[in-house]
């Protein structure tokens, strides 16, 4: 694979004594939708924070657009982030601004566009997610799915080259989920961008991902197309893809013997 | 054991340095600063005026009782004016500011942290210190002396109401003695104190909010810390400034 947009190699990261990544390697190909899957607590969101430079790894390389992210000075990091867009799990809309102003926010900060041009741009992005009519609403007046779509509109308003989605399907009804699934793939293909989707919704990711990584215990345990992952002989992959409660990833958090604990 | 408070003071110092660097760019957006002056100042006006009135009335009562013992009740105006200008005005306003505007600033910024709004700004390559924190800090800083001035005016009215209208102090003596005894230095002392309290209370409020744990309990704790630290700091700074102005 030539010229990956994101390249992570030998990544080690932990908080306190807890080791989250222990030699993680992955690459994100240009123009593709790459899914990062894994059980809760495997560090999927932490990986995104490392890619966007919010966290610094203990060891290893994190490169985005060929630039090493750790240790990047703030102006260079901000310049790099202008080439990215990110959709947060909860939308993270600015609650004191209207939908229109939320989408206009990064443009007002980084570009001096005449007001009519800005208005046309913002309305076109809201139209792309089907919420042009909600431009004057405040974030508190939106449903969870609508807030997610507004956040997506804000994430693409600066025409990023890399779009990062953190658990985009969590808490959505089937209609909203279907809309978001369709938008992720359509935006990726129509705008020619690269997408990273972090989620544990296997069925939805199978519809949109070109390539998937499955993380477990700080490493990539499997990778490939969604179909290849489904056919994987690895037990941990089978457990995750079929949603079995117990297996290599235990249902119970490590604890002493139940009867002994009750008696003590 | 002493390391944590020292570390915290160091962090506040570093935060203040970073914040001051962002105050220049923030001033280029005067609308955001004016909005925060309104939030911190205008929305505290009722409580400031009410408390100013009651403090002035108490000052009128206590001052009259004390001065009457020496046959100097005509000096009530001077006593009330100096008490308000130099001490009660700045100190009580700062304590009220910490409880009303300070907690509001902390919880607002803390909730923005907890709901990823500040992180979203950072990902959009927008510095939250410049966009969120600096306008709020400047708003508090500007609002404080204005609130102190209003507190003093209403307080003087309250003292006059009790001293002149209720207890029969001669109105001419009340105002003329005040005019002749209060000097520019007294006014400057009040202004300097109000500015220092404005910096301290606003800084603590935005620092605690910005560094709050991103949970409900964390924001609650940060809000409590804002009130406690601001109040103690106000009284400490008041003592230091009073000693400095008196040359002791």
Image (tube, grey):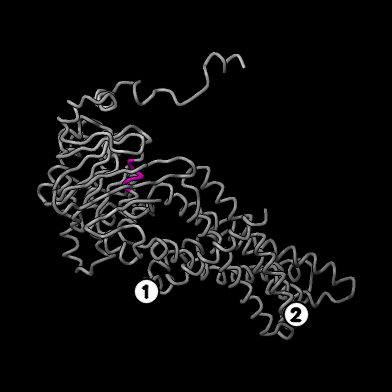
Q: Quadrant of residue B46?
A: bottom right
Dot 2, how many residues are within 10 Å of its Cα: few (below 14), some (14-19), or many (20+)?
few
Q: Secondary structure at mark 1?
A: loop
Residue B195 horizontal side relative to residue A6, left or right: right
Rounded to the nearest whole Å, what is the CA distance between mark 2 and mark 1? 38 Å
User: Can you give x and y, in whole percent of width and height, for residue A27 in the image?
Assistant: 22, 47
User: Can you give x and y, in whole percent of width and height, for residue A83 in the image?
Assistant: 22, 59
User: Can you give x and y, in whole percent of width and height, for residue A150 in the image?
Assistant: 25, 48
What is the quadrant of the C terminus of chain A in the image?
A: top right
Residue at 46% x, 46% y is: B214
Q: Is residue B114 magenta?
A: no
Name the residue nearer the viewer: A88 or B177: A88
Query: Which residue does the numbered mark 2 point to in the structure image?
Result: B246
Q: Quadrant of residue B33?
A: bottom left
Residue at 25% x, 59% y is: A104
Q: Is residue A202 above or below residue B91?
A: above
Q: Is residue B212 above or below residue A79?
A: above
What are the residue bounds of the magenta stretch?
A44-48
Name the residue nearer the viewer: B26 or A86: A86
Q: Secondary structure at mark 2?
A: helix
Residue A229 horizontal side relative to residue B197, left or right: left
Name the residue nearer the viewer: A235 or A122: A235
Query: Which residue does the numbered mark 1 point to in the structure image?
Result: B28
Q: Is residue B248 above or below residue A223?
A: below
Q: Is residue A73 above or below residue A47?
A: below
Judging from the image, mark 1 belongs to the subunit labelled: B
Dot 1, how many residues are within 10 Å of its Cα: few (below 14), some (14-19), or many (20+)?
few
């Amino acid at each position: 694979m030539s010229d990956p947009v994101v390249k992570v190699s030998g990544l080690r990261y932990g908080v306190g004594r807890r080791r989250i990544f222990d030699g993680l390697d992955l690459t994100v190909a240009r123009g593709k939708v790459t899914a990062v899957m894994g059980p809760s607590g495997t560090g999927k969101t932490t990986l995104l924070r490392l890619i966007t430079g919010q966290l610094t790894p203990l060891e290893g390389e994190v490169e985005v657009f060929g630039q090493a992210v750790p240790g990047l000075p703030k102006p260079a990091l901000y310049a790099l982030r202008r080439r990215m867009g990110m959709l947060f799990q909860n939308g993270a809309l600015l609650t004191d601004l209207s939908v229109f102003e939320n989408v206009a926010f990064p443009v007002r900060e980084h570009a001096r566009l005449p007001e009519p041009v800005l208005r046309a741009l913002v309305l076109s992005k809201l139209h792309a997610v089907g919420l042009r009519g909600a431009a004057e609403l405040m974030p508190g007046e939106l449903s969870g799915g609508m807030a997610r779509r507004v956040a997506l509109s804000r994430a693409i308003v600066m025409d990023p080259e890399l779009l990062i989605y953190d658990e985009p399907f969590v808490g959505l009804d089937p209609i909203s989920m279907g809309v978001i699934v369709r938008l992720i793939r359509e935006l990726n293909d129509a705008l020619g961008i690269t997408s990273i989707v972090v989620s544990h919704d296997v069925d939805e990711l199978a519809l949109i991902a070109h390539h998937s990584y499955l993380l477990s215990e700080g490493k990539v345990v499997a990778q490939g197309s969604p179909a290849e992952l489904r056919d994987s002989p690895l037990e941990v992959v089978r457990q995750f893809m079929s949603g079995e409660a117990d297996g290599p990833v235990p249902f119970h958090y490590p604890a002493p013997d139940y009867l002994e604990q009750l008696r003590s | 054991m002493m390391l944590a408070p020292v570390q915290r003071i160091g962090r506040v110092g570093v935060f203040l340095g970073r914040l001051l660097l962002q105050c220049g760019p923030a001033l280029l957006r005067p609308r955001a600063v004016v909005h925060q002056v309104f939030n911190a100042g205008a929305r505290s006006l009722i409580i400031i005026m009410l408390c100013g009135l009651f403090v002035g009335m108490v000052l009128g009562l206590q001052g009259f009782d004390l001065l009457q013992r020496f046959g100097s009740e005509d000096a009530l105006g001077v006593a009330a004016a100096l008490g308000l200008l130099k001490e009660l005005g700045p100190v009580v306003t700062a304590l009220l500011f910490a409880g009303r505007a300070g907690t509001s600033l902390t919880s607002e910024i803390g909730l923005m942290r907890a709901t990823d709004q500040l992180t979203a700004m950072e990902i959009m390559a927008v510095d939250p210190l410049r966009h969120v924190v600096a306008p709020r800090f400047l708003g508090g800083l500007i609002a404080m002396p204005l609130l102190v001035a209003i507190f003093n005016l209403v307080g003087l009215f309250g003292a006059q109401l009790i001293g002149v209208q209720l207890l029969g102090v001669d109105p001419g003596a009340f105002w003329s003695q005040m005019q002749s005894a209060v000097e520019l230095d007294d006014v400057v002392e009040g202004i300097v104190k109000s500015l220092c309290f404005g910096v301290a209370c606003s800084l603590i409020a935005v620092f605690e909010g910005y560094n709050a744990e991103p949970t409900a309990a964390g924001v609650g704790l940060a809000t409590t810390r804002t009130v406690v630290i601001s109040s103690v700091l106000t009284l400490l700074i008041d003592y230091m400034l009073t000693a400095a102005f008196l040359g002791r």
